[in-house]
Structure formats: structure tokens, C-alpha cells
């Protein structure tokens, strides 16, 4: 039986001796490489927290002591040590989530994979414990990247208030988000990291010099004084201590004994304390250690021996954006790119390569990015902010009140819009169109293929009197879907059957599904007009006019069904006095468990045949003079 098999509960770790723990760490790494290379997942981050997580579970008694993981992508080791060993279906429907999951374990607390929230969670839990007289530890494990998020500093400011509240902040400092972490804080942590060398020298001094009589002791004192001096000069970790938060470290996060010692000191401190652990993303797996892009931050299925992808990535939406924004940059010197610590994943790396001075990586700081972009637009630039759709949520107020209120010419490019699926509830880019629909003056385009993405991106950056948004899904591009004709900015994709009774509106990449709906209706003898509005917000007047020429409108969108584009069109028809029923097909108003995109599309009856069937039934109801059945999407 392996040591990993012996760990059924964290308490089993207590009985292991240092040798057994070293073997356990080795077994965990082997397990992670073997399993995650098959399923895909956050391999690099988890390889970097093996010893740290073992130490956490030896020093603290989860779940009575609360351990909160920031972002949660680095919680696989935590799952292994808390009784979950079957990673065979990781991030697949019915399998383990890629993030903490309360449904899986009492040891899991935060399911939200949006970064920089752990310190606020921990502050809240610690305050509640104090008010309720619960004398237990609260630990937040936060990465150096997540620490660049504004929420983290709001929390630190508050945590510092609680000098009598036990709260341990473990900074898991591997020097990277995807790429090396940016900004003043990163440089500060870097300086502190250099002290680690002095720490090692001090340990040597402590072990050897102090045992070699008075001269040795004098030499050690001098060395210790030097370290103190250097610590204050080179690495004024006063930043934390000036805030009122004790600082312990830097400690080698791969040295189990040293990490446990530091955590135990922190546990006993009785107030807010930071343990600064230096770790290495991808540690122990050469392909990850040697990966200069992102240390295998997030991988698909790979060959474990080489780390090479099993299936080469196909030319996708992100790659088209990456190409087109460079072309735009060549023509427009006022265009700059902004990223929130995701330069490569959002496709701005080629732009940065060609225009190094015109890409700003703000760290995981979307709110700052948006308002800073408003400043850039005010001062004569045209910022293009590239984000994953779901991460724009946290910068909504900045978009509304800094960009839109001031009619700033800022373009938002939202990748991973719509159902992403395997990354779980907080990663689906399903909220953007419903959120952005309420922003006055905002224009939103949803391209359906490569050609419309290129065109609509160019149209977006040409707008200087308000925010524009271009949003597209994750992954591979669909085939090009040429228009039959254009009508007032609307692309007519198909006219099928006899009298066109149903207007089928495909939003963005769902235009392909809309074409299938038209085919399905045609097979049932029902005529339709299939359109892609391209620019869906504000609702085009031409779309209202087109709706008026049909008996029924069916909208299909990769976003919330209630409150999305279909709802916006229904409202526009109402305002225009057009009495044509609208059936909105989209994502239900719910938090979605991890599953594949295809499984979710089927579950929500978003396939062409599903929508065609429902639409034909609606036409029958109309013909019978019965009310058109409302669409009640299942969650
Ligand atoms: C608000 C938000 N923006 C962006 C991301 C995407 N993201 C996931 S992990 C990560 C890097 C996190 O770096 P760090 O906190 O240092 O953790 P590490 O991966 O190094 O362990 C980013 C940017 C996110 N999850 N949340
Ligand atoms: C945890 C996090 O937010 C990212 O690592 C995200 O999981 C990456 O998503 P993609 O794999 O779609 O780039
Ligand atoms: Mg990091």
C-alpha cells in the first residue's frame, strides 16, 4: 500500500515520519502527472503546492480549522489528502470539480475560481469565529498573482484591524501568474525571496558557526546582523508589518520541515500573520519546469513523458483575434492592448511581441484595467482590453461608470464567452450579454466565424464615442458561414420553405445552430428566415422590422436566456408595438456544474433539432389560436 493510499484523512499525516512524508510527496507528484496528463487540468500550480499542502494539513486541523484556497485551481493536493483519490473524471460531469466543491467535501469552502477573494473570505470567517467564540484557525492560501488583485488589498487593510483575530495568510509565491507576476508587489516579493538565500546561509551559520566556539558565534552574530540589515534595506518587508500584519519568511515551500515550523509559529501567533512560502510552479516535472510560457499552468491531455499535447490545438477564435489585433495595431498607433495577467491565453502575445510598449499587463486587476483604459481613452488612446468573459463581471461598475458614463472609446474583447463547461460554475462566460445589455451607449458584437470576427473587431475599434464589446466562445472556430444578403446591417443567412413564418435569430457562434433550426422547420413544412444581427446591442431597428414580417421570433444565444439578447429584442418589439411572440433559447438562470460544453448544450435543449421541434410546436399553437408556450429552460 502506498503512503498516498494510507492517507484517508489529514489526521493520517500526523503519524508519518519525515521519510514517509518525503515518499508521500513523491507519490503525489507521480499521481498528479499520471492522472492530469490524461484528463487535463491545472498541473503546474498543483505540482508547486505538494509540500505546502501536506504541511498545512499537518499543522491545521481541517475542517475545524478553515483552509481557503484562492482561485482554487491549486487544490488537487488538498483533495487527495482529504480522501478524494478518483481523479479519472476530473472536471467532467459526475467527476471531481477542478476547484474546491462543498458537495464533495466539508474540507472545501470557496468554489469561486475568480482570483483574489480568499483574504476576504478568511476575514469574514475569522470575524464570525471571534463573534461566536469559536477558537479555531483560519488560513487563506493566496498566490503571488492573486495578491495583485485589488480585493486582496481591501482585505489586508481590514485584516490588519483584527490584531486579536487569528488569521494566517499563506502567500504561495512561485513568482508567476501564468507568466512572471508583474508590478511593485511582485518586485517586493522578489526582494523578499532573495532573502531566502540569506535564510539558508543563516541556517548553515546557525548549524556550524555557533558550534565552533566564541569566534564562530561572533561570526554568526555578524552574519545575522547583516541579514537583518539586508532584510531592512533590500527587502523592506515592512510593507506587511507596517500594515500591522506580522511577516514570517521567506520560507522554502518545498522544505516540509521548515514550512511546518513557519506555519506552526503562525498558528500560535493569535493575530493576523503572513507566511511567505517560496514555491516553484511545475516542480518535480521537467516538462513543466522547463516550460517558459506558463509552467503548465493549465494543460489539456498531454503525453506524460514529454509534456507534449496529445491533440495539437486547432486554429481557434483566440488565434484570429491575435492576428487581427496585430494588423489593427500596425494601422493604428493609438491602439493599445490591456491584459489582466493573461497575455498569452487571451491572444495578446503577438501584439506584445510587435508593440512591446503598447501592451499593459495590470496583473489580476480587471477593475484597474477598465478604469485605467478610460483614462487612456480620455488621453487619446484606443484601449483594447482582452479578458475572459466571466472575469469582466468584477469590473462591471468600472465599465458602467468610468467607461460608459464618459462615453470612452474602449473596446472589450471577451474570450471564453458562453458555455465553457469543464471549468465549472464560475468560468462560464454566460453573464456578459445580460449584464452589458443595461449599459447605456454600449455596442456589442457577437461574431459567428473568422470573417465576422475580423470585421467586427475592426468596426469596434473604429468607435470612439463609447464602449464596444466583441465576444466569442472558447476553442476551435466553426466553418465560415457566409451571408446570403445584408439588410440594414443584418446578415440574412438562410430563407427556407414557403411563407417565412418564423424569424430565427442566431447570436454569434449560435448562428450555426440557427441555420439548423431553419432546416428543421423546413422539414416540417414551416418557412423561416435565419439571420445573424452581428451587432446585437443595442437591438438593431432592422431586426424589429424583420420580426414584424413574421409570426414568431426564435432567438438562440450562448448566454442567459432570461435577460439576454432575446429578452432585449422582446422589449424592443414591445416598445415598437410589434405583437410578435419571441421564444428565447439560451442558458438557464443557474450556476452550472462542470460538464462538457456538448453535454450542457444538450441538457438545455440548445441543439438545432431541439429548438426546431419546440418552434414547430409553437407555430402549431399559433395556428390553433392558442398562446405560444413560454420557454422554460431546464437548469
Ligand atoms: C479575476 C480572475 N482573473 C483571472 C483569472 C485567471 N487566472 C486563473 S489562475 C491565474 C494566475 C494565478 O496566479 P497565482 O495566484 O500566483 O497562482 P498560481 O497559479 O501561481 O499558483 C489567473 C490569472 C482568474 N481566475 N480570476
Ligand atoms: C483558473 C483559471 O481561471 C484559469 O486557469 C482557467 O482555468 C483557464 O481557462 P482556459 O483553460 O479556458 O484557458
Ligand atoms: Mg503564482
Image: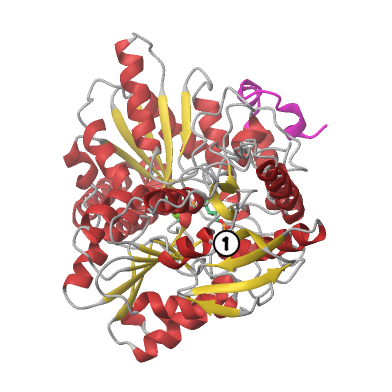
Q: Which residue is mark 1?
A: 473
In depth, the one of 517 and 447 nearer the eye is 517
Report the side of 533 relative to 351 (left or right). Answer: right
Is residue 379 or residue 357 the one in the foreground? Answer: 379
Quadrant showing the C terminus: top right
| Secondary element type, mark 1 | loop
In the image, farthest residue toward the bottom: 331
Location of the N terminus (image quadrant)? top right
Q: Quadrant of residue 5?
A: top right
Q: Is residue 351 above or below residue 527?
A: below
* Residue range (magenta): 1-17
Task: Classify 10 Å Cα crowding around label 1: few (below 14), some (14-19), many (20 and above).
Answer: many
Residue 29 appearing in the image: no
Q: Is residue 327 magenta?
A: no
Residue at 56% in and 25% down: 107
Which x, y percent locates residue 95? 73, 38
Amino acid at each position: 500500500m502506498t503512503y498516498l493510499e494510507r492517507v484517508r484523512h489529514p489526521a493520517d499525516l500526523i503519524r508519518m515520519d519525515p521519510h514517509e512524508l518525503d515518499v508521500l510527496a513523491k507519490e503525489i507528484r507521480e499521481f498528479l502527472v499520471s492522472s492530469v496528463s490524461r484528463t487535463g487540468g491545472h498541473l503546474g500550480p498543483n505540482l508547486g503546492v505538494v509540500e505546502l499542502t501536506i504541511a498545512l494539513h499537518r499543522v491545521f486541523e481541517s475542517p475545524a480549522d478553515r483552509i481557503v484556497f484562492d482561485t482554487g485551481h491549486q487544490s488537487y493536493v488538498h483533495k487527495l489528502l482529504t480522501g478524494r483519490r478518483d481523479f479519472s473524471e476530473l472536471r467532467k460531469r459526475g467527476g471531481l470539480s477542478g476547484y474546491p466543491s462543498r458537495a464533495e467535501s466539508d474540507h472545501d469552502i470557496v468554489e469561486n475560481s475568480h482570483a483574489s477573494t480568499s483574504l476576504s473570505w478568511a476575514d469574514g470567517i475569522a470575524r464570525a469565529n471571534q463573534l461566536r467564540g469559536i477558537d479555531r484557525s483560519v488560513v487563506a492560501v493566496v498566490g503571488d498573482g492573486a495578491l495583485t488583485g485589488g480585493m486582496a488589498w481591501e482585505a489586508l487593510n481590514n485584516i490588519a484591524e483584527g490584531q486579536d483575530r487569528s488569521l494566517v495568510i499563506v502567500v504561495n509565491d512561485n513568482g508567476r501568474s501564468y507568466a512572471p507576476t508583474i508590478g511593485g508587489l511582485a518586485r517586493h516579493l522578489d526582494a523578499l525571496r532573495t532573502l531566502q538565500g540569506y535564510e539558508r546561509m543563516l541556517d548553515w551559520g546557525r548549524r556550524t558557526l555557533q558550534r565552533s566556539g566564541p569566534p564562530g558565534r561572533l561570526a554568526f552574530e555578524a552574519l545575522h546582523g547583516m541579514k537583518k540589515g539586508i532584510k531592512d534595506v533590500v527587502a523592506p518587508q515592512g510593507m506587511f508589518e507596517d500594515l500591522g500584519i506580522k511577516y514570517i519568511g521567506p520560507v522554502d515551500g518545498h522544505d516540509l520541515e521548515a514550512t511546518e515550523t513557519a506555519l506552526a509559529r503562525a498558528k500560535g501567533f493569535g493575530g493576523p500573520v503572513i507566511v511567505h512560502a517560496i514555491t516553484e510552479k511545475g516542480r518535480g516535472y521537467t516538462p513543466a519546469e522547463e516550460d517558459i510560457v506558463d509552467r503548465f499552468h493549465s494543460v489539456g491531455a498531454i503525453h506524460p513523458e514529454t509534456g507534449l499535447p496529445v491533440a495539437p490545438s486547432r486554429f481557434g477564435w483566440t488565434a484570429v483575434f491575435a492576428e487581427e489585433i496585430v494588423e489593427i495595431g500596425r494601422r493604428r498607433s493609438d491602439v493599445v492592448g490591456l491584459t489582466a495577467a493573461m497575455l498569452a491565453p487571451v491572444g495578446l502575445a503577438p501584439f506584445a511581441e510587435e508593440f512591446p510598449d503598447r501592451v499593459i499587463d495590470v496583473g489580476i486587476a480587471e477593475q484597474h484595467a477598465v478604469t485605467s483604459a478610460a483614462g487612456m481613452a480620455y488621453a487619446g488612446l484606443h484601449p483594447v482590453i482582452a479578458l475572459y468573459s466571466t472575469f469582466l463581471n468584477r469590473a462591471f461598475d468600472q465599465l458602467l461608470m468610468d467607461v460608459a458614463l464618459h462615453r470612452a472609446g474602449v473596446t472589450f474583447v471577451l474570450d471564453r464567452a458562453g458555455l465553457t463547461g469543464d471549468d465549472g460554475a464560475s468560468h462560464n462566460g454566460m453573464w456578459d450579454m445580460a449584464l452589458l445589455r443595461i449599459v447605456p451607449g454600449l455596442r456589442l458584437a457577437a461574431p459567428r466565424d473568422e470573417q465576422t470576427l475580423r470585421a467586427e473587431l475592426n468596426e469596434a475599434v473604429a468607435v470612439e464615442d463609447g464602449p464596444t464589446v466583441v465576444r466569442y466562445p472558447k476553442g476551435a472556430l466553426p466553418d465560415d458561414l457566409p451571408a446570403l444578403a445584408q439588410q440594414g446591417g443584418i446578415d440574412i443567412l438562410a430563407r427556407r420553405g414557403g411563407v417565412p413564418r418564423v424569424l430565427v435569430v442566431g447570436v454569434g457562434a449560435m448562428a450555426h445552430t440557427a441555420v439548423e433550426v431553419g432546416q428543421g422547420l423546413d422539414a416540417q413544412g414551416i418557412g423561416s428566415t435565419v439571420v445573424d444581427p452581428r451587432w446585437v446591442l443595442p437591438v438593431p431597428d432592422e431586426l424589429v422590422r424583420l420580426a414584424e414580417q413574421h409570426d414568431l421570433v426564435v432567438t438562440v444565444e450562448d448566454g442567459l436566456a432570461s435577460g439576454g439578447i432575446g429578452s432585449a429584442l422582446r422589449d424592443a418589439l414591445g416598445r415598437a408595438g410589434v405583437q410578435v411572440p419571441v421564444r428565447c433559447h439560451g442558458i438557464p438562470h443557474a450556476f452550472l456544474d462542470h460538464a462538457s460544453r456538448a453535454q450542457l448544450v444538450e441538457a438545455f435543449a440548445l441543439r438545432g433539432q431541439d429548438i426546431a421541434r419546440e418552434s414547430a410546436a409553437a407555430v402549431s399553437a399559433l395556428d390553433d389560436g392558442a398562446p405560444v408556450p413560454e420557454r422554460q429552460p431546464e437548469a
